[in-house]
Image (cartoon, helix red, strand yellow):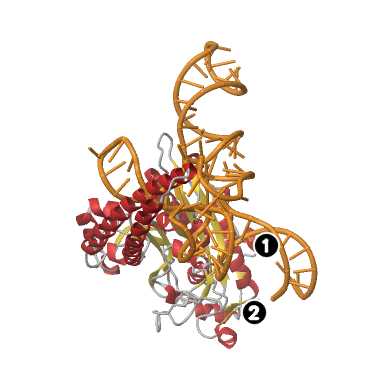
Amino acid sequence: MFDVKWIRENPDQFDHGLARRGLEGAARGILDLDQRRRGAQTELQELQRRRNELSKEIGKAKSRGDDAANLVEEVNGIKEQARLLEVADQSFADELRAILVGLPNLPAEDVPEGLDESANVELRVVGEKPDFAFEPKPHFDLGEGLGLMDFERAAKLSGARFVVLSGALARLERAIAAFMLDLHTGEFGYTEVSPPVLVREETAFGTGNLPKFKEDLFQTTSGYYLIPTAEMPLTNLVGGEILDEKSLPLRFTAATPCFRAEAGAAGKDTRGMIRQHQFTKVELVSIAHPEHSNDEHERMTACAEEVLKRLGLPYRVIVLSAGDMGFAARKTYDIEVWLPGQGAYREISSCSNCGDFQARRMKARFRPKNEKAPRFVHTLNGSGLAVGRTLVAILENYQNADGSLTVPDALRPHMGGLERIAPGQ
RNA sequence: GGAGGGAUGGCCGAGCGGUCUAAGGCGCACGCCUGGAGAGCGUGUUCACCGAGAGGUGUCGAGGGUUCGAAUCCCUCUCCCUCCGCCA
């Protein structure tokens, strides 16, 4: 969400930012509405001032026992005019808001130009790809071979894009989440949170998922939305609050199930666990001081990368082009893990700095020292990491010729010391 | 599901038709005092918008109504809390 005053002062910059995302300029329409709204407002305020003045006089006159009939008459004349202006002001404001809530955040200056993923820029490649003496299998063949990953029964229960894990793989999923949470809380200063996964409409609005992306979300019959990511509850934790500057940055992490309707993804990644309606993810959220959000963004990305380093998974980091970023982001790093079974890098984390875009929507502010007005905080979110895809990556990178799986060292303490997962286990 | 009670500034809390220009407290900021700190004293401090400024308008959960005038009265809605019922 944008500050109209800022658009008024920087209309070209605003339209340029939208253009970088492949959108048409909107400043002209916004400013036209804004001007008309302010005109109505100024006029209305003048009438209200006069009305207040007269009301006071009436009060005084009546307390003196004087007749105030002509004053009352004048006020009544004002009222009808004021009502019309109020309606006009409101309708301009509504129209303006309807436009503003549907516009995405502007890309940061250093974000690469381009309208889609082909313009993303690779920043670094980390880790060694495993060298197999055999043809590496995709994770679904491995999982099904182990007898611990069942898509058919999942379909029986819930349909396509669900999975049932059992035995050592179910435990591996739990171990991965526990390992990540322990790292982020124990070494990186994040506070673990166990948030609701059903949220109100306002919460979904705050992060920018509503009103524009309603079709991506599941909704209950009683009106709750199922969270598509813990970013939603974690970021909204500070919604409507004026924080103490000294409390920043706030860092939250949570492992939650995430629910996505995947409405526009028909036919994409239909096999395996890559794209599911329900998956577990460990999320990182920072509520940062505006002057430090860029540093916080780098730090958060490093926290997510550290997970992959400790798990011994090869990956690369890319910076998304202006047109490939999500709605709320001003800059996004994607971390892509190497999947030998697919022979490709696949997204396993996405770390975004949203600037004050979400903070404005949810009115999350802090009180700066020696300034009278509160300011909006900056919000950042990143996966740290997607647990389901991490399990996929471990299966494919740690597979053995016999179809068994070596448990990465870092996870063994969370697996009761288990070193290998073999078929039938 | 049933029955009640609430929603006021960063926080707590008074107010129940016109001096609300919202008491008081806490917190915070600045100043005085002090060797320094604390205590104490003083001053300031809702937020949003309009305005170059002086200043103005709105804002007491939201929307509507009554009234010359609403935090205060009426209606609708939302949210929170308590008790009962059901229940992991």
Q: Which residue is mark 1?
A: A416
Report the chain holding disc 2.
Answer: A
Percent across and percent down for residue B39 are 62, 23
Q: CA distance from mark 2 to mark 1?
A: 18 Å
Q: Which residue is mark 2?
A: A424
Percent across and percent down for residue A279 are 53, 71
Type of amino acid at the residue the image marks with label 1: Gly
Seen at 50% across and 58% down, the residue is: A236
Q: Identify whether A60 is placed above or below A112.
A: above
Report the chain holding disc 1.
Answer: A
Q: Nearer the viewer, residue A388 or A47?
A: A47
Q: Is residue A13 visible?
A: yes
Direction from residue A240 to residue A50 in the image, left or right: left
Direction from residue B46 to residue A115 in the image, left or right: left
Seen at 57% across and 56% down, the residue is: A181
Disc 2: CA contacts within 10 A as few (<14), some (14-19) or many (>=20): few
Q: Quadrant of the C terminus of chain A?
A: bottom right
Q: Identify whether A202 is placed above or below A56.
A: below
Type of amino acid at the residue the image marks with label 2: Gly
Q: Are marks 2 and 1 on the same chain?
A: yes
Percent across and percent down for residue A171 are 63, 69
Q: Nearer the viewer, residue A132 or A47?
A: A47
Q: Earlier in the sequence, mark 2 or mark 1?
A: 1
Q: Quadrant of the N terminus of chain A?
A: bottom left
Name which quarter of the figure residue A256 lies in. Answer: bottom right
